[in-house]
Image: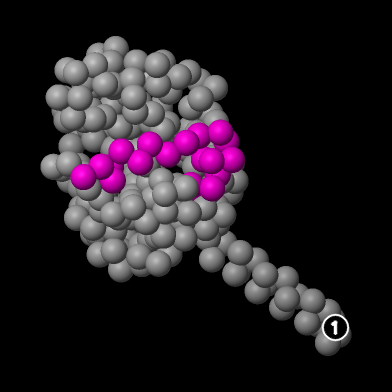
Amino acid sequence: MPRISISSLIAFLLAFFTVATCQAASIIVDAGHTSAHPGATGASGRVEHLYNLDLSKAVTEDLQAAGERVVRTGADDREIGLADRPNAAPNADFFISIHHDSMPQAWIDEGRNRLLKGFAIFVSERNPHYEQSLVCAKTIGERLLAAGETPSLYHATPIKGENRPLIDRRLGIHRFDDLVVLKTAPMPAVLVEAGVIVNPDEERRLAQPATIAKLANAISNGVVDCHP
């Protein structure tokens, strides 16, 4: 049996522990809503779930290209409960749910649907990893800002059904403690509303492949950035 020098053994152990501690993260990427319950309806009549599928697929592909392991939820025709989405892979390192935004029907009826645009990011203080969720929300928000996107801030409006505490105005981060996918997630979790599809101008932009690619790149890079 050949003799192994101390220096060779140390080099081997260093290499082994480097590989062991640099494993790819496991990420759940959730496409909000389902085919049967598709969420908001865009100005064109195209439903939110289809936008969520497009963007979540692009986010998934970017994360995989970065070497991360991804589990997708809400991406097939099966119904899936809200709490089942983050618990589809309970040992995952992070959960992100992809959505697109609406506004009150009364505002649309009044012709105010062109007034809102931009993204919103949500975290829940009831998530067991709230502080890390907030870190991830901030890194995603920074990446979206750097990509030229702007926060809508609509969900902080003091009206029924909204009035969400605004944690970071610049980054569009709100607290929504009762969001089921966030509060039941056993890992850090964030929900992103990528844009306002009831705004016809915003909807056309959000449907463009270049916009989807830009948003996906920003979101995926933000997710990668937040890993401890």
Q: Quadrant of the N terminus?
A: bottom right
Q: Is residue 84 magenta?
A: no
- Report the front residue among 100 and 86: 100
Q: Residue furthest top?
A: 44
- Report the front residue among 61 and 146: 146
- Report the front residue among 128 and 138: 138
Can the viewer see residue 190 in this picture? no
| Residue lying at 23% horizontally and 30% vertically, measured from the top left | 103
In the image, taking residue 19 as reference, residue 5 lies left or right, namely: right
In the displayed structure, would residue 1 be above or below residue 201? below
Secondary structure under tag 1 reads helix
Image coordinates of residue 41 in percent, x first then y, are: 23, 22
In the image, taking residue 82 as reference, residue 225 lies left or right, namely: right
The magenta segment is 140-158
Counting the numbered discs, the total is 1
In the displayed structure, would residue 104 be above or below residue 8? above
| Residue lying at 37% horizontally and 56% vertically, measured from the top left | 167
Classify residue 112 by image quadrant: top left
**Residue type pointed to by label 1:** Ser
Image coordinates of residue 228 in percent, x first then y, are: 54, 66
| Residue lying at 54% horizontally and 48% vertically, measured from the top left | 142
Q: Is residue 144 magenta?
A: yes
- Colour convention: one colour
| Residue lying at 35% horizontally and 65% vertically, measured from the top left | 130
Can the viewer see residue 172 in this picture? yes
Classify residue 193 by image quadrant: top left
Residue labelled with disc 1: 7
In the displayed structure, would residue 73 be above or below residue 181? above
Image coordinates of residue 188 in percent, x first then y, are: 38, 60
Q: Residue furthest bottom?
A: 6
In the image, taking residue 216 as reference, residue 155 lies left or right, namely: left
- Report the front residue among 195 and 79: 195
